[in-house]
Image (cartoon, rainbow, N blue to C red):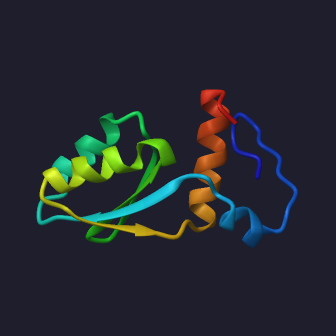
Amino acid sequence: LLPPPRVLVLDEPTARVAGCADVVLEAHAADRAPLDAFLESNDGVLAVTPAGERIRALTLASRSEEVRSGLLALGAEVTRCAPDFEDLYFSLATRAKRGAA
C-alpha cells in the first residue's frame, strides 16, 4: 500500500485485513443525509464509504460504541461488519496522515 503520505506494508493481504484494529459499522436509514453529516463530523470515524442504500463507517475501536449509539439515535439500523481490504487501506492511510500509525 502506498497512499499519500506513503505507507508501505509487506504482508499477506488476508492476514493484514484480519488484523485490522478498527471497527466497521454499516448503517441504513430511510434518509441517509443525517447519517452522512454525523459521520463526517465525528473524529472517531476514519473513513466513510457509501454502499448503495447503506453506508459503511470505519471507526476507531475505542470510539465505535459512541459512533454506533449516535447512528442508532438518528434512527439507523446498524450492524458490525468484518473489514475488507479497502477498510484496511483507509485505516493505514488515515492513521499515517493523522500521525497515529
Residue at 65% across / 31% down in the picture? 100
- Residue 41 is left or right of residue 60, and the answer is left
Q: Position of residue 16 (x, y in %)?
A: 74, 62
Give the total of numbered labels: 0
Q: Where is residue 81 in the image (x, y as percent from the top left)?
A: 45, 69
- Determine if residue 60 is in view: no
Q: Foreground residue, 28 or 71?
A: 71
Vertical placement of residue 62 versus 83, above or below? above
Spot the residue most to the top. 99
Query: Residue 54's quadrant in the figure?
Result: bottom left
Residue 96: x and y, percent?
68, 35
Residue 38 in view here: yes
| Residue furthest right in the image | 10
- Corner quadrant of residue 10: bottom right
Relative vertical location of residue 30 with respect to residue 33 in this rendering, above or below: below
Could you say where residue 61 lies in the image, as x and y percent from the top left? 50, 48
Q: Is residue 94 left or right of residue 25?
A: right
